[in-house]
Amino acid sequence: MDKTPLYHEIAETIRQAILYGTLQPGDELPPVREMSERWNCAPGTVQRAYQELSQQGLVVGRPGQGTRVAASTLPDSHAPLRRATLVHEAESFLLSTLAAGYTPGEIEGALRLALDRWRAVSEAPPEATGPALRFVGSHDPSIAMIAAHFADLAPGHTLRITFAGSLGGLIALAEYEADLAGCHLWDAETDTYNTPFVRRFLPGRRVVLLTVAQRRLGLMVPPGNPAGLAELTDLAQPGLHFINRQGGAGTRVWLDAQLHRLGIDADAIDGYDRAVSTHSEVARAVAQGDAGTGLGVETVALAYGLDFVPLTTERYDLVIPAPVWDSAPVQALAGWFASGEAGEAIAALGGYDAGSTGQVQWIE
């Protein structure tokens, strides 16, 4: 494993001294030349460590006054120190996983999936540090990436995410407990997505459907597909353990409609009543051998190294009421979608067709 860069070690030593009070706000750090002799390194290495601490808000350098511990590290304001500690932990994790052979893309994808799972099991969403738009709705791996870009597109604003299924998102909009929702509800009568449900749950309200992407839905199975699954009728085979999505999830709505069409009794499927809140939780159960298969999106199957049996392609939309759509942060997000950059970023995740990404449909 690669050794941690020396400037990181120097910076971490100073961080710890600040954390435990050895260095107090206003204290001057040793001159660069003295530190370079102490650590037996070039002055540039010490300067890089001091620069890192300065960027994290922990120290301040002024001409003629040296480099001093910033006043913001007083006990009643630990934000810079907390951020610095978090960055250090993230860098340590990144270095160790890169050394183990993982690519930056694999690491980023794994972190997004882990955050998605945490959001699903957390009792309440985290408190936002600034103005926040409330997202409630269906789980999709692209949402975490969209949220990250949203912070850059609308500085000072955040997208607060709660995964509650497509129906949960529409109900939250109807009760004014959400600002936008994620939805992929298939209507059997019209063979269309989302529009009939939006009209049913939000009658008389002007709403925009902003298409995120078309995504592939199917059965996630262990590598090699040992059970030989090819279609939904195979779910009733003896000895196969299924894991389901929660009631109200668009995936569950689609599955129930298909089972009814095929004349398959849900009671014949072992595990039908075992339900989880995200595609990531389904994939995790299959990857760990706790289930033989589950219905989910290809993007997550790829991230977990599972095989995938495609069954359909569905449209995933953001449902946005007109007053929210007209707000500056959402218009910035819509501009990113319209530019084509969002589609490229979503397609890069795998399992998506981004040809319709950014399309806007008004429902009056």
Image (tube, rainbow, N blue to C red):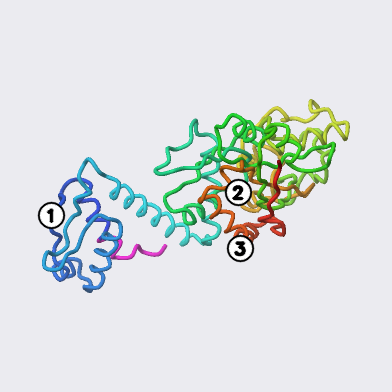
- In depth, the one of 196 and 56 nearer the eye is 196
Residue 288 visible, this angle? no
Going by the picture, which residue comes out furthest to the top? 267
Mark 1 closeness class: few <14, some 14–19, many ≥20 residues within 10 Å: some
Query: Considering the numbered disc 2 on the image, is that residue within a helix, a strand or a loop?
Result: loop
In this view, which residue lies farthest toward the left?
64
Q: Residue at x 43, y 43 (%)?
A: 131
According to the image, label 2 marks what residue? 141
In the rendered image, residue 205, in percent from the top left (x then y), is placed at 66, 36
Residue 169 image point, x, y percent:
62, 35
Q: Amino acid at mark 2?
A: Pro
Q: CA distance from mark 1 to mark 2?
A: 46 Å
Using the rendered image of the protein, determine whether residue 260 is visible from the camera's viewpoint: yes
Classify mark 3: helix, strand or loop. loop
Q: Secondary structure at mark 1?
A: loop
Q: Is residue 165 left or right of residue 315?
A: left
Q: Position of residue 361 (x, y in %)?
A: 71, 49
Q: Earlier in the sequence, mark 3 or mark 2?
A: 2
Q: Which residues are magenta?
A: 1-10
Residue at x 14% of width, y 53% of height: 26
Disc 2: CA contacts within 10 A as few (<14), some (14-19) or many (>=20):
some
Q: Nearer the viewer, residue 179 or 307?
A: 179
Q: Sequence order check: which comes first, mark 1 or mark 2? A: 1
Q: Nearer the viewer, mark 3 or mark 2?
A: 3
**How busy is the neighbourhood of tag 3: few (under 14 within 10 Å), some, or many (20 plus)?**
few
Please give left or right for residue 252 compared with residue 6 in the image: right
Q: Residue sitting at 51 percent across and 51 percent down?
A: 328
Numbered tag placed on residue 218 in the rendering: none
In the picture of the structure, the residue carrying the numbered disc 1 is: 27
